[in-house]
Image (cartoon, helix red, strand yellow):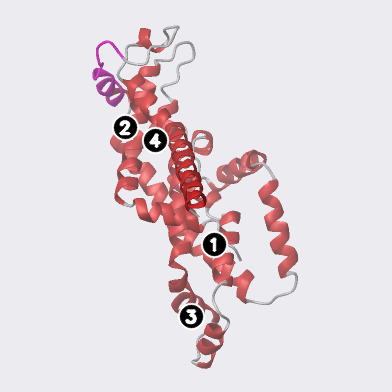
Amino acid sequence: MKQKRDRLNDESRLSRFTTHVVLIFASFLAFGPFVWMFLTSIKTYEETIQIPMKFLPEIPQWVNFSIVSDKLNFPQLYLNTILVTIMMIVGQILIVTICAYAFDRLNFPGKNVLFMGMLALMMVPGQIFIIPRFKLMVNLGLTNTLVGLVLPGLFNIFGVFLMRQFFSTLPRELDEAARIDGCSYFRTYWNVLLPLVKPGLTTLAILGMLNTWKDLMWPLINNSQADKMTLAAGLAMLIGEHTTYYEQVMAGGVIAVLPLIVLFVIFQRQFVQGIAHSGIKG
C-alpha cells in the first residue's frame, strides 16, 4: 500500500512539474513578443538591424518615444480608435443579439437554411468582400469617416452564432411566462432574455474590442486622412518606402498597446471568463 501511495505521489509530482514547464513555455511565447517590442523601442537604429541580433540596448534611447509622439498625433488616434471601438461594440450587441434571438426563439420559413448559409460564409476569406465594401462606402459618401469604419463590421456572423448558443441555454418557459404577461417579442428579448445572457454580452464586447482595436486593413483602405485614422493605421505610416526605423515603430506599438495592457490587468477576471465563455456548448 505504501509503495502504491509513493508511486502515485511521484506521478502527481511529475504531472505538476510537466504542467508547470508547459505553462512557463506558453507564458514565454505569449509575453516574449511584448518584451522584445519594448526592448527594441529603446534601441538605436543600428542596434535594431545588427546581426547577430542584440537583446539589450547599450544605452536606453527613451527619446524614441518623443520622436514618435512628434510624428503621430496620438491623442487624435486614441480618440478615433476609442470612438470606433465603442460604436462597434454597441452596434454589434444590438444587431447581433437581435439576430441571435430571432434564430433561436422565432419560427419562420427557411430559418435553418438561412442560418447554415450564414455560417458557411465564415469559411469565406474576408478579403473577398473588401472591394464591394469599399465601393459601398464610396457610394454612401462614408470614406474618410469613422462611421465608414464601423458600418461594415456591425453584423458579426460569429457573434450571432455565439449569442444563439447562449440564448439556447435559457428555458422556453421564460418566453411563455412573458407572453402570458402580455410581452411582445421585443420586450421578451429586451427585458427578459437579454439580462440573462450577460456573460455572452461580455464575451462579445471583449472580442469586438480586441478585433476593432487591432484592425489594420480596413482603416487603411477606407480612410486616408491622418485625422480620421485609428492607431493601427497610424502606426503603419511609420513604415517607410525605402527605410523603416524599427525602433520608432516599436515605440509607437508600445504606446498603442498600453491601454489594452492596463485594461487587461484591471479586468483580468472578466477577460478570462469572457474568452472561456466563447467556447460554450449548445
Q: Earlier in the sequence, mark 4 or mark 2?
A: 4
Q: Earlier in the sequence, mark 1 or mark 2?
A: 1
Secondary element under disc 1, as helix, strand or loop, is helix
Q: Is 282 displayed left or right of 75 in the figure?
A: right
> Residue at left 41%, top 29%?
32
Secondary element under disc 2, as helix, strand or loop, is helix
Residue 236 in percent (x, y) is at 45, 27
Q: Quadrant of the C terminus?
A: bottom right
Q: Are marks 3 and 1 in contact (CB under 8 Å)?
A: no
Magenta stretch encompasses residue 181: no
Label 4 vs label 2, nearer the camera: 2
CA–CA distance in space, label 3 to label 4: 39 Å
Residue closest to the eye, 55 or 44: 55
Q: Are marks 4 and 1 in contact (CB under 8 Å)?
A: no
Secondary element under disc 3, as helix, strand or loop, is helix
Residue closest to the eye, 44 or 8: 8
- Residue behind mark 3: 187
- Residue behind mark 4: 231
Type of amino acid at the residue the image marks with label 3 = Arg
CA–CA distance in space, label 4 to label 1: 26 Å
- Residue behind mark 2: 255
User: Which stretch appears magenta?
Assistant: 57-69
> Dot 1 surroundings within 10 Å: few (below 14), some, or many (20 or more)?
many
Residue 53 in percent (x, y) is at 42, 11
Q: Earlier in the sequence, mark 3 or mark 4?
A: 3
